Amino acid sequence: MIKKGIRRQIVMHYFIVVFSTLLLAEVIFLLAIRSYYYDSIYSHITNHVKQVEDYQKFSTTMNDGKDDLGSLLTVYKLSFTEMQILNVQGDVLINSSEFQPDESLKTSDISQAQSGNIGRWVGRQPNTGENVMAVSKMEQNNGQDAYIVRYVTSLERVNDKLFNVTMIATAVAAAVLALVLAFSLGLANSIVKPLNTITAVSAQMARGKFNIRIKGNYKYELGELASTLNYMAQEIIRSNQVKDDFISSISHELRTPLTSIKGWSETINSGGYDPEETKIGMEIITKETERLIGLVEEILDFSKLQQNEMKVSFARVDLKELLQEIMLNLWTKAEKRSIELRIDSVDKPIVEGDANRLKQVFLNLVDNAIKFSHENSAIDLIVTFEGNNVVVQVHDTGIGISEDHLVKVKDRFFQVDPLNGGTGLGLAISQQLVELHHGILLIQSELGVGTTIVVRLPRLLEDASPADAMELPKLPGASS
Ligand code: ADP
């Protein structure tokens, strides 16, 4: 007995469908064969019984109306068939066999003959129990019903043949059913076995074993399911790794300013320092606190972007003005390392966007450029038009990024050197913010030569209303 489940379902479905079809086909086939045989016998006897009419005419002229029933029997008897002549009431007058029933016959063929048709009856002989077919016809004399001619033939041989045909048909049906069972079992196994393996492996994954993989070359949907689960496990491992890296990098980032804040606050608290030193300590505490706030804000921004909850309000933004503002913001930082910030921009590079968010993007890009540039170098901000886009390039001649790292720098939390400071979120956030503005962010870099970050944003034409310029992305809570 097959256990409850898909295997049993498949086998049962196939079995029920094929079994009912075969049963129906066999019944129809056997009934057709039976009626073919019986009809052939009936039409053979009917053709014969019709000839008795000829004898009737001939005999009427020869014997002056008196039928010679004995010679009728001799002339018209049929081999393997008993011929009877009955009076109109159905009593046997003469019979081709020895046996003569005393009582009058009541079978349906006789009543049909009495009403003027050629009667047919199939049933068991009351005396022998043999299966027979009887065909009867009323004969007339001078327009009057005279007697009934009745042929009775045994159906035993025909029934034997029908039985043999039935046996062969049943054997064929059983063979077909066995084949179908074997085939459906094979089909069910080809689905159930991989499913069991996949279930067992996914149960292990659910218990946290993500290194395990579904092996085997499964086809079609099962193959897709297996590779999706394998991919899921791989992604879980990857995101766990990213999470661990993030926690360790964040802990490091938090620890440095916190240690400094703690050290200086303890020092100030213990007293005995001159006001100048206390002032320096307080400045460091403020700077480190600001750094901590920046870090936390960056993490919050990233989390909002991840959950599509970043609120943006769109307006006309002149990128030249925005970049000039950024240069002012970062001027001191750049000057400390003798880095020159230069801008070369077309007139009115207008885009539609959220000025604060775009500022965040370019602050991060220029800040990175300063962070990774050598002393006494220059950073160029180049703004051009390219078709219907405004293109901003932030170009530095700093340390550059190797080819291996270039593909990963836009990944969240990725840093070439975690000791450089930062969270590894800046480029990931910038990329998502640029995409929110229907733009793209590309990085071109060569290790030891320098880096150029290209931001391409749709241009807002002077005479176009903001809504004509581009279709804005639907953001939860965004206003334009
Ligand atoms: P972070 O906050 O750590 O700077 P980012 O996502 O902004 O994070 O940058 C990811 C990494 O990409 C940096 O740690 C750095 O290694 C590399 N990177 C970004 N900008 C530059 C650049 N202009 N020159 C060289 N390396 C860069």
Image (cartoon, rainbow, N blue to C red):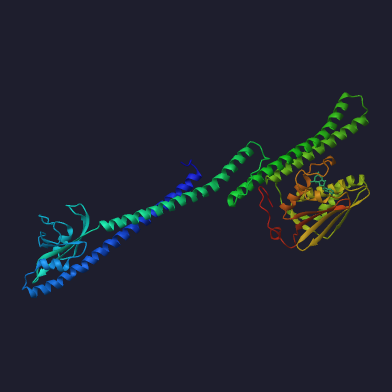
- Position in image of residue 372 (x %, y %): 87, 47
Q: Is 83 situated above or below 256?
A: below
Q: In the shown orientation, is residue 180 left or right of residue 300?
A: left
Res 17 seen here? no
Question: Picture quarter containing residue 138?
Answer: bottom left
* Rendered view: 255 above or below 181: above
How many discs mark residues in the rendered view?
Answer: 0
Please name whichever residue, 142 or 125, is drawn nearer the observer in this view of the structure. 125
In the displayed structure, does residue 145 sit left or right of residue 444? Answer: left
Q: Position of residue 447 (x, y in %)?
A: 86, 51
Say if 72 sits above or below 126 in the image.
below
Q: Residue furthest bottom?
A: 61
In depth, the one of 449 and 189 nearer the eye is: 189
Q: Can the viewer see residue 410?
A: yes
Residue 204 rendering spot, x and y as whole percentages = 63, 38
Q: Residue at x 84, y 29 (%)?
A: 262
| Front residue of 226 and 43 | 43
At x 73%, y 40%, the residue is 241
Q: Is residue 42 left or right of residue 474?
A: left
Image coordinates of residue 289 in percent, x first then y, are: 82, 35
Q: Quadrant of residue 321?
A: bottom right
Work out whether residue 347 or residue 457 is closer to the camera in this orientation and state it.
457
